[in-house]
Image (cartoon, rainbow, N blue to C red):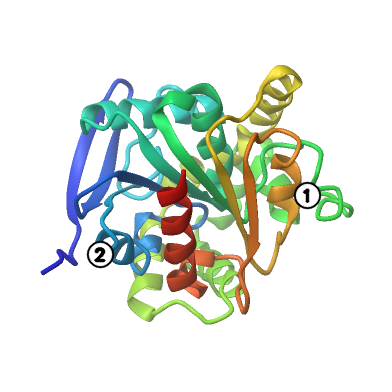
Amino acid sequence: MHQTTPATRRIPLDGVELAVDTLGRGPAVLLLHGFPHTRAIWRYVAPRLAAAGFSVIAPDLPGLGDSTPSTHGYRADAIAADLAALLDALGERRAHVAGIDLAVAPAFALAAAYPERVASLTLSEGLIGLLPGAEDFLRQGPPWWFGFHQAPGGLAEDVLANSADRYIRHFLSAGSRHGLPDDLTRTIVEAYRGKEALRNAFDHYRAMPATAHWAATWARTGKLTPPALTLGGGVLGPATAGQLEPLATRLTAHILEDCGHITPIDQPAAFARLLTAHARTA
């Protein structure tokens, strides 16, 4: 009988405490959510991976959900350092790493900065700074909310202080072609309630220019050695693969059919199946 309910732990690290769901036994798979999500976004993928023989680790990103803000900041390589420390705390030498949306950059950074810790890398519906390869997606510039979230002086959280519920529901509704269950929507909306929760989320966006600079600097001489898989959905499609193609020593690109932006919700079976196959051949 496979365990189907994750165990939740709080893992204190240097400068941050991460809330983490764990499930299953076997090689570790680290699942990283985006915005506006929490670790609960993996509720349909994690049991499938556990049933396939993996040990699933699904944290809330620093400052989001039930995790505390990080004193290291939110540049992608700083988050990667926190994630490497999380693997240490859990006694995992290596993990198959998957990141969606906002977590694509830190997942990439973990594989770039700590390649010995990453058995394979799976990226879905997110960008790595402004690296070449995503020109078609960025032809009209980044999505409008990037600039809004990055506005100085806490503008976004001030404007949204009394409208967070509507704002978060907008992104969840627009991001899924099939819709989120009501209970999952309520869980995520509650996680972003209040000005402090919004500030922590938008601080991730405010770190994006620094992340873009870090990624561009690394890409001048770096090569991504862990085998990489991209799972495009209905928004970015092939853009992530386009950014990885010049950098990855081994890259497989796949577009998920009948899928919106939140790929683990719209196509959890396909997501888990493709990640499993990728991990087993890494």
Query: In the rendered view, does 238 fall on the left or right side of 200?
Result: right
Is 247 located above or below residue 180 in the figure? above
Of residues 142 and 196, which is closer to you in this image? 142
Residue type for callout 2: Ala
Identify the residue at image location x=78%, y=49%: 142
Q: Amino acid at mark 1?
A: Pro
Q: Position of residue 50 (x, y in %)?
A: 26, 59
Q: Which residue is at the far front?
A: 281
| Label 1 or label 2, whichever comes before in sequence order | 2
Circle number at residue 51: 2
Asked whether the viewer can see residue 270, the reply is: yes
Q: Position of residue 20 (x, y in %)?
A: 26, 46
Q: Nearer the viewer, residue 38 or 168?
A: 38
Q: In the figure, is residue 240 to the left or right of 16?
A: right
Please name the residue shown 56% across and 27% down the image.
112
Mark in front: 1 vs 2:
2
